[in-house]
Image (cartoon, rainbow, N blue to C red):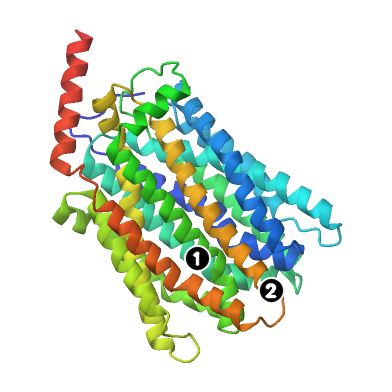
Amino acid sequence: MGNESNNGKVPLISKIAYGFGDVGCNFSWMFVSNFLMIFYTDVFGISMAAVSALMLFSRFWDAINDPIVGGLTDKTHTRWGRYRPWLVIAAPLTAVILVLTFWAHPDWSNTNKVIYMVITYCILVVGYTCVNIPYGALCGAMTQDIEERGKINTSRSVSAMIAISIINIITVPLISKLGNGSDRQGYLLIAILYGTIFALCHIFCFAKTKEVVELPAAEKRPVIVELKAVMKNKPYMLAFIGQLLFGFTLYGRNANALYYFTYVEGSVSFFSIYSLVIMIPSIIGAACFPIVFKWTKNKGRTASIFAILTGICMIILFNFSAVTSPILFYAFSGLAQFFFSGFNTAIYAVIPDCAEYGEWRTGIRNDGFQYAFISLGNKIGMALGTSLLALALGSFGYVANQPQNNVILGVMKHSFTTIPGVMWIVTGIVLLFYKLNKDTYNKIVHELNINKVVNDK
């Protein structure tokens, strides 16, 4: 690894390349979060109960593999750094598993369907973990400058919002076009396309980024020691809770979106229109993070402001419909997405700064381990959000590809508007307690650097 420059500046190409990493992540994971549940129920022919059970079971699996992968990334030592090699090796392998996950076999027995679903999904989760944890930790190894990290995460979030918008706009039409009337074939071909994009983006990220922060040599520490260290890191614990709520709210709503537009609004085509409308607000919102952060000088409270405003807009959205009041429906959808994108940038910008705070507070630097638990918190939230949605729909009589009863329609509508709205406000209130501001962070980094100079003598 090279030495960090005096001013800690990161080249523009590296910021762009880091952003492309999240483009790849979203062509995998956002595709999964938005489309996998309805693929399982309406294309593969798997019951809601089985899907709900899988979402909960897989989080126990995550509780095992996430800390292991995080610990392994901290112990990795190569000429390319600790984190970058994971991207170039794990991403292509994960792309293959993504394709297998979306390979439907509706003619199989119910037992064989569930076995195949469990095996492919659990392997997919491990593969994604092997990419996402080192990718997230990489930001903290690129610079210690708090504003540069903010710019890197802005690039990440803007790139992600563009990727998510493209995925949501083109996927439904592509299923029809590539499938030639067969959703089974359409999903498989899209998975091949998106898996290829996923792998190529991470190869580009590997090639054009550089780990320049000299991290302490990884020590062999028991997991309990690592856990005690992160428990003493108050900013990190707030970031963890924020990610838990984030995962629950975002992924539960995303999993519900196709059901909402198909059955409540009456046509899945509204989903593509909705995605097109919110594209520009999402990009602008992500780019506005540095402006609000410059005012607050506190990334956690910046995230809090964006989260609360997102929640207010979603609660108001309950009163409108894409069919009967399209202007107001899309206006508040755009506003909600604008504020959400600002939150998304801010919450990920918080995480790297917690590593320095933890090192200063406890003497332990464990970026990969910390990001592993952030990832776990997000996934636990995702599991709870999606499994509760599946459980509710299954309990109240959901039948795939048929008109739904009023209770089911009500569950879908509230799951798209008021429930996530309230949860975003709760998330915002939690993050109001985040106190690691810019001045405090800079003092911590300065003190750590002085200590390193003293120890090197």
Disc number placed over residue 393 in the picture, else none: none
- Looking at marks 2 and 1 on the same chain, the residue that comes earlier in the sequence is marked by 1
| Residue 116 position within the rendered picture, expressed as x and y whole percent measured from the top left | 77, 49
- Give the amino acid type for the residue marked by disc 2 in the picture: Gly
Tags 2 and 1 touching, CB below 8 Å: no
Decide if residue 316 is on the left or right side of residue 402: left
| Residue 374 position within the rendered picture, expressed as x and y whole percent measured from the top left | 42, 42
Q: Residues within 10 Å of mark 2 (few under 14, many from 20)?
A: few
- Is residue 105 visible in the rendered image? The answer is yes
- Give the amino acid type for the residue marked by disc 1 in the picture: Arg
| Residue 207 position within the rendered picture, expressed as x and y whole percent measured from the top left | 45, 37
Question: Quadrant of the rendered structure where residue 312 is?
Answer: bottom left
Badge 1 element: helix
Residue nearest the observer in this picture, 102 or 17:
102
Decide if residue 75 is on the left or right side of residue 264: left
Q: In which quadrant will I find the N terminus?
A: top left
Decide if residue 63 is on the left or right side of residue 329: right
Farthest front residue in view: 395
Q: Is residue 206 above or below residue 285?
A: above
- The residue that mark 1 highlights is 253
Q: In which quadrant will I find the C terminus?
A: top left
Residue nearest the observer in this picture, 83 or 455:
455
Residue shown at the point (29%, 62%) measured from the top left? 306
Question: Quadrant of the rendered structure where residue 160 is?
Answer: bottom left
Foreground tag (2 vs 1): 2
Q: Is residue 329 above or below residue 427?
A: below
| Residue 232 position within the rendered picture, expressed as x and y whole percent measured from the top left | 31, 31
Disc number placed over residue 397 in the picture, else none: 2
Badge 2 element: loop
Residue shown at the point (44%, 18%) measured from the top left? 221
